[in-house]
């Protein structure tokens, strides 16, 4: 049975304080006399860590003993954010810690703010992986995450003279949440060549020889569920030079420099997260990262399976592996290689096992984001894997040929190998062929996959291999943690915090939509959250913003398809309109604060130009005495998870305005609505399902539909393009140097008025401006706005990550939860 109490499990304030002081004085070797906030953070983290460790160990023991099917979530990104607050809430002792810290003279918020974000991801895909971990633990699924332990996470963004400057994010010093497992290592091979030989039975076999070896070392991170004892494991691999005799010999021979160089080359593999979001660049180091992590994870998973002494045929009954995009596709090839080259299985039997094991999630239809690796690159780095890929392709194309003997085109269209110069391996096709289920992340996105990108594969495999699982978010972090007061108000009305475990219970607050006291409190909480953001803005930008103004927020990675340029052109349009107004007219303007945040990939010049323009517009607008409080433009630097926790609860309206058909799902749309913000958006990604759930009277939709995008682009291409007149006014202002040297922004304007407006900014501009007018109008009626806000939150239950996780568990993984508190 679960031990109730142990030396390292505090439950009262006094016990917590004792643990805290003990850790500060012994673990940290600091004195309580000069204990600053950082030391208080470390001590608190260590005290909570002790509690997590006990539950973590027990969970691992129970899961091993029960030996049920486990799910392995392979992701190159885990955008975790901070851990302490989440850990305190999950074990239900945040109030205890608050009181204890108070006794010692600290405010818990200040202590929490000492923690550095764990930012091992770019954006949506990485945050989705983190939400998965939270939900899988909360729902008691025996689940593991596997990723890379980057020494540098996503860069920190500074804004200097309006330009983005990237600063390295070294985050590993004094991280109490990871546990090095120096005993858990895997040797990973690169380069070398393939030898054919006859095994004892005379069968032709292959061995991969003479490569270079790099060692993978496991670092484990505990993942506590909310209100459960289940504490799962996130295993991150770090690279190190293998301690083989190779470098030892060099060292002995006095060739220190070269020995050290070898070591550094090995450590480079897990050194840095690639900062591209939705953009692939075929760099060798990235391929090395992918194989290193896939091979280490597969070795670990297979090792765990082999301990149970089961027959190989049972592998898919014990193991489900989910691929977060195509980044881990090599895991498919690696498992096939292990089964045939190492374990001696026949090809067909092995391939059956492989395809039953894997599921693949696609997150994008953007062509520039689809991974392709050059054949020569792969031939050099992973010669045996390339052979296996060719073999998989051969068998696949043979079955396609049999099914469609009269269709000569289809073979080249669906081949894993693209016949270009150089030839390329299409990773998405390999992932589809090697998986039993392929899913998109919102209905429109999954439909587009089936009708466009993966159309041929639907014909080949039938529709059953393709499915949709609309994304969600964890209500623990994105409601309870980010917006404690709103969570408390809801809990008060519903009589408990059960909605945090079953978000559909939120629908019960719709009954209070006309309750005066409830509405007032709702409004007060929004205002307080806006004040908190206003303070942050003041502290980081120096600008004062009016908390009564409409806070209009767009925070996400900067990308042309997400159309921050549409937003800033809209802001300029608003600015010009206000400047044209008489004093009388100005009185009717709804004051606005337009808030932007997001990082641009360092090599994405157009995205950086957008950031630059936003900041230049801010310079001009915010200092214009004719404008005053009517309009402020704010760029919040270094948008990340912990800033999102401040920003999401503070919006009146947020922008999700991608060109229709381009955003997979979007997940910040859900975070904003769950926190009582309304949204303006296109009919794209999960906006469509949000509309269905909350009702179209509660959302501001605008713009062309996905089905019309192709035609519009086609028209532009053939010269049928007329710049929207209101947008023309905006461009004229830019070209008149209103925001500084117009040459700086010419790429941005010319991509629209000269080069075909691929993202349809001009086509949607009028609709966008008109809809913002409706937003202003609606905001004037605060009572109705409040009703929309409350009703929307009440109807957001569908977007819980718990619903998402259960759908994957039932329809893709076939795994069951496991109660870790059951007696053994
Ligand atoms: C690929 C190759 C080489 C280097 C980098 C990459 C790379 C890295 C990150 C490609 C894509 C990403 C990230 C993609 C991403 O975040 N996609 C988002 O996933 C969310 C969760 O499903 C969706 O809500 C978003 O719509 C989607 O854009």
Image: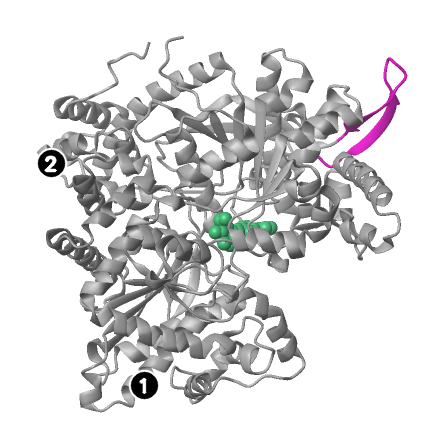
Q: Which of 432 and 269 is in front in this view?
A: 432
Quadrant the C terminus occupies? top left
Quadrant the N terminus occupies? top left
Is residue 201 covered in magenta?
A: yes
Residue 275 seen: no
Above or below, 792 relative to 310: below
Residue bearing the label numbered 1: 577
Closest to the camera, between mark 1 and mark 2, is: 1
Marks 1 and 2: CB-CB under 8 Å? no
Local SS, label 1: helix
Q: Which of 443 and 570 is in front in this view?
A: 443
Residue at position x 24%, y 82% from top? Answer: 627
Residue 416 seen: yes
- Report the colour scheme: one colour
Residue at position x 30%, y 32% from top? Answer: 87
Above or below, 575 relative to 106: below
**Res 573 → quadrant:** bottom left
- Packing grade of label 2 (10 A; few <14, some 14-19, many >=20) is few
Classify residue 471 as left or right of residue 721. left
Q: Earlier in the sequence, mark 1 or mark 2?
A: 2
Residue 102: mark: 2
Distance between the alpha carbons at the discs numbered 1 and 2: 51 Å
Classify residue 459 as left or right of residue 519. right
| Identity of the residue furthest to the right in this view | 202
- Packing grade of label 1 (10 A; few <14, some 14-19, many >=20) is few
Above or below, 516 relative to 186: below
Across and down, in percent, residue 535 comes to 20, 59
Local SS, label 2: helix
Q: Magenta part of the protein: which range?
A: 189-210
Across and down, in percent, residue 605 comes to 53, 67
């Amino acid at each position: 049975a679960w031990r109730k109490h142990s030396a390292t499990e505090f439950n009262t304030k006094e016990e917590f304080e004792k643990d805290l002081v003990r850790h500060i004085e012994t673990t940290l070797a600091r004195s309580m006399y000069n204990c600053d906030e950082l030391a208080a953070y470390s001590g608190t983290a260590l005290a909570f860590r002790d509690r997590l460790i006990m539950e973590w160990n027990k969970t691992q023991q129970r899961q091993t003993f029960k030996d049920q099917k486990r799910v392995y979530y392979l992701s190159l990104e885990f955008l975790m954010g901070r851990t302490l607050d989440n850990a305190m809430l999950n074990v239900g002792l945040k109030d205890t810690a608050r009181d204890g810290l108070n006794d010692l003279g600290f405010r818990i918020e200040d202590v929490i703010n000492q923690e550095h974000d764990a930012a091992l991801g770019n954006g949506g895909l990485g945050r989705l992986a983190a939400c998965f971990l939270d939900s899988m633990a909360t729902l008691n699924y025996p689940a593991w995450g596997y990723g890379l332990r980057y020494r540098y996470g996503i860069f920190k963004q500074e804004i200097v003279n309006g330009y983005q400057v990237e600063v390295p994010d070294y985050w590993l010093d004094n991280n109490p949440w990871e546990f090095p497992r120096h005993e858990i290592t895997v040797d990973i091979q690169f380069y070398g060549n393939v030898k054919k030989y006859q095994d004892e039975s005379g069968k032709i076999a292959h061995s991969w020889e003479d490569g270079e070896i790099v060692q993978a070392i496991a670092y484990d991170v505990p993942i506590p569920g909310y209100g459960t004892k289940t504490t799962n494991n996130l295993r991150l691999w770090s690279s190190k030079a293998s301690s083989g005799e190779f470098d030892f010999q060099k060292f002995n021979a006095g060739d220190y420099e070269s020995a050290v160089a070898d070591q550094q080359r090995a450590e480079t593999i897990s050194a840095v997260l690639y900062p591209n979001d939705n953009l692939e660049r075929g760099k060798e180091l990235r391929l090395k990262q992918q194989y290193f992590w896939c091979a280490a994870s597969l070795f670990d998973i297979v090792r765990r399976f082999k301990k149970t002494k089961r027959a190989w045929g049972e592998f898919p009954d014990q193991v489900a592996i989910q691929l977060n995009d195509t980044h881990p596709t090599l895991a498919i090839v690696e498992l096939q290689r292990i089964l045939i080259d190492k374990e001696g299985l026949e090809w067909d039997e092995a391939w059956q096992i492989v395809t039953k094991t894997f599921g693949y999630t696609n997150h994008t239809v953007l062509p520039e984001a689809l991974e392709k690796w050059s054949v020569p690159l792969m031939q050099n780095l992973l010669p045996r894997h390339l052979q296996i890929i060719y073999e998989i392709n051969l068998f696949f194309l043979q079955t396609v040929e049999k099914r469609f003997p009269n269709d000569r085109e289809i073979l080249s269209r669906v081949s894993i190998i693209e016949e270009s110069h150089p030839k390329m391996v299409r990773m998405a096709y390999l992932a589809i062929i090697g998986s039993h289920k392929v899913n998109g992340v919102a209905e429109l996105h999954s439909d587009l996959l089936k009708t466009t990108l993966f159309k041929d594969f639907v014909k080949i495999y039938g529709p059953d291999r393709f499915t949709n699982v609309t994304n969600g978010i964890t209500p623990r972090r994105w409601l309870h943690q980010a917006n404690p007061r709103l969570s408390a108000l809801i809990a008060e009305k519903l009589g408990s915090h059960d909605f945090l475990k079953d978000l559909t219970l939120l629908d019960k607050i719709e009954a209070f939509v006309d309750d005066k006291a409830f509405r007032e409190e709702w409004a007060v909480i929004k205002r307080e959250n806006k004040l908190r953001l206003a303070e942050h803005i003041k502290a980081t930008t120096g600008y004062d913003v009016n908390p009564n103004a409409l806070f209009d927020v767009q925070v996400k990675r900067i990308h042309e398809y997400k159309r921050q340029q549409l937003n800033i052109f809209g802001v300029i349009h608003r600015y010009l309109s206000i400047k044209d107004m008489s004093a009388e007219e100005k009185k009717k303007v709804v004051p606005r604060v337009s808030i932007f945040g997001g990082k641009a990939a360092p090599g994405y010049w157009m995205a950086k130009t957008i950031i630059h323009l936003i900041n230049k517009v801010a310079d001009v607008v915010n200092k214009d005495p004719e404008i005053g409080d009517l309009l402020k433009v704010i760029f919040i630097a270094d948008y990340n998870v912990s800033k999102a926790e401040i920003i999401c609860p503070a919006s009146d309206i947020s922008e999700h305005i991608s060109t229709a058909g381009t955003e997979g799902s979007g997940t910040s749309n859900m975070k904003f609505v769950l926190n009582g913000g309304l949204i303006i958006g296109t009919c794209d990604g999960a906006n469509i399902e949000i509309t269905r759930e909350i009702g179209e009277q509660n959302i501001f939709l605008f713009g062309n539909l996905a089905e019309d995008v192709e035609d519009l682009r086609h028209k532009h291409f053939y010269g049928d393009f007329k710049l929207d007149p209101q947008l023309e006014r905006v461009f004229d202002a830019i070209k008149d140097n209103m925001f500084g040297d117009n040459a700086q922004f010419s790429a941005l304007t010319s991509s629209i008025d000269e080069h075909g407006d691929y993202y349809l900014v001009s086509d949607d501009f009028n609709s966008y401006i008109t809809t913002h007018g409706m937003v202003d109008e609606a905001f004037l009626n605060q009572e109705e706005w409040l009703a929309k806000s409350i009703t929307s939150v009440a109807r957001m239950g569908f977007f819980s990550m718990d619903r998402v996780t259960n759908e994957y568990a039932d329809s893709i993984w076939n795994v069951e939860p496991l109660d870790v508190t059951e007696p053994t």
